[in-house]
Amino acid sequence: MQSMTFTAVALMTLLALPFKAHAESVDVTVVAGHPPVFLWVKTMSETFIPAVDMALEGSGTEIDWTEAYGGTLAKVGGELEAMEDGLAQVGIVSSLFEPSLLSLQNITYVTPFGPSDVKLVLETVDAMTNEIPGMRKMWEDLDLEYLGGGFGLEDYLLMTKFPVKSLDDLKGRKINAPGAAVNWLKDTGAVGVSGNLTTYYNDIKSGVAEGVIVFPTAAAAAKLHEVAPYVTKVHFGAQYAGGIVAKKSWYDEQSPDVQAALQAGAHAFARSYEANLTLRVTKAFSDFEAGNAHVTEFPEDVRREWANKLPNLAQDWAAEQDAKGLEGTRVLEAYVTHLKDAGVHLPRDWSAK
């Protein structure tokens, strides 16, 4: 009897203890080809992941993260393939490096001299992704779920070995430019030379090029002002460069809690990225000045002249997309309309034929 009483008391005591459910753990590998020194990767680690974890608190699910950055799993531009192969479930994919597979997402690169406001550009492209089925379909055709959290590059400028006050100053000059930005030099008299951040410094120093189209934070980090001390704020505009995605076939199998948490993480990423980018741009210009660079503002009338001298890059691009059965014209018209509705004054209406 005494033994039974002890057992009963022990059982009642055990039942009275707080019950702690065992959380379900989901393994997630996050991939980015760039190292964490780049703001978009740093923000993935410091903002996106903690925001997802916070959103999952109390849900009974937690994520066991593996962060694979800086070429440990994929080289720059190889994130898409890593996710396609099932090596990662979440990644930051640069549409900039996928001009064919994600052509509609590159709308900002065919509409130069757009707004310098990164937040506006990113929010506009994100909104269009929800409005235009063809834009989201491009991600889904690659088995990717676009979570948002678009990341972009701040207002591009011109850095040269010589002062630039007019288009005449560019005649015959060799200018480095990344990818599609080479087209921003067409019919200006300048000679576009394809390059990237790893080649610019030596190209200019060796005479392969005499200047570069680049965004300030990258230019300051690479100390390009040492070889190209004339920094001209041409205001080519901020650019949409990609976003956070999940492998769609994996994402669709996840609980609503996990899906909602990933979306919340992407939203937090976007707000943090925009705020910190502004601080980095300010520091970049401080670095230029500390390095005795000559920072000047490009005359608005010359900027307008440059924009109107270019071939109609946007219409050519739209026609090419339309011919492939994609919504090129719709994307172009929607982008320009969004900008006008936001009060942006464009030196050239790229939607006009």
Image (spheres, grey):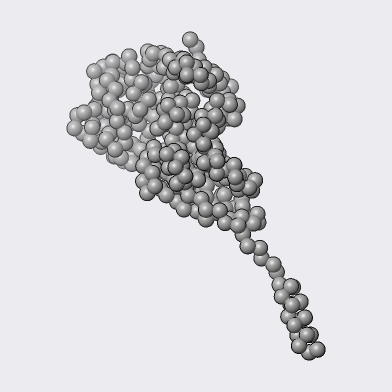
Residue 282 lies in quadrant: top left
Q: Which residue is drawn at 64% across and 56% down?
A: 60
Residue 106 against residue 287 in the figure, above or below: above
Residue 116 appears in the picture as rendered: no
* Residue furthest bottom as drawn: 2
276 displayed left or right of 170: right
132 displayed left or right of 109: right
Residue 158 lies in quadrant: top left
* Residue furthest right as drawn: 1
Residue 313 against residue 284 in the figure, above or below: above
Q: Residue at x 74, y 73 (%)?
A: 16
Q: Which of 267 and 12 is in front in this view?
A: 12
* Image location of residue 294, percent across then percent down: 30, 31
* Image location of residue 239, percent across then percent down: 45, 30
Q: Which residue is drawn at 27% across and 34% down?
A: 200
Q: Which of 218 and 343 is in front in this view?
A: 218
Q: Which of 270 and 170 is in front in this view?
A: 270
17 displayed left or right of 122: right
* Image location of residue 69, percent across then percent down: 40, 48
Residue 216 against residue 319 in the figure, above or below: below
* Residue furthest left as drawn: 206
Residue 98 appears in the picture as rendered: yes
- The number of numbered badges drawn on the structure is 0
Residue 209 against residue 69 in the figure, above or below: above
* Image location of residue 46, percent across then percent down: 49, 50
Rendered-image quadrant of the N terminus: bottom right
Q: Which residue is drawn at 33% across and 17% down?
A: 186
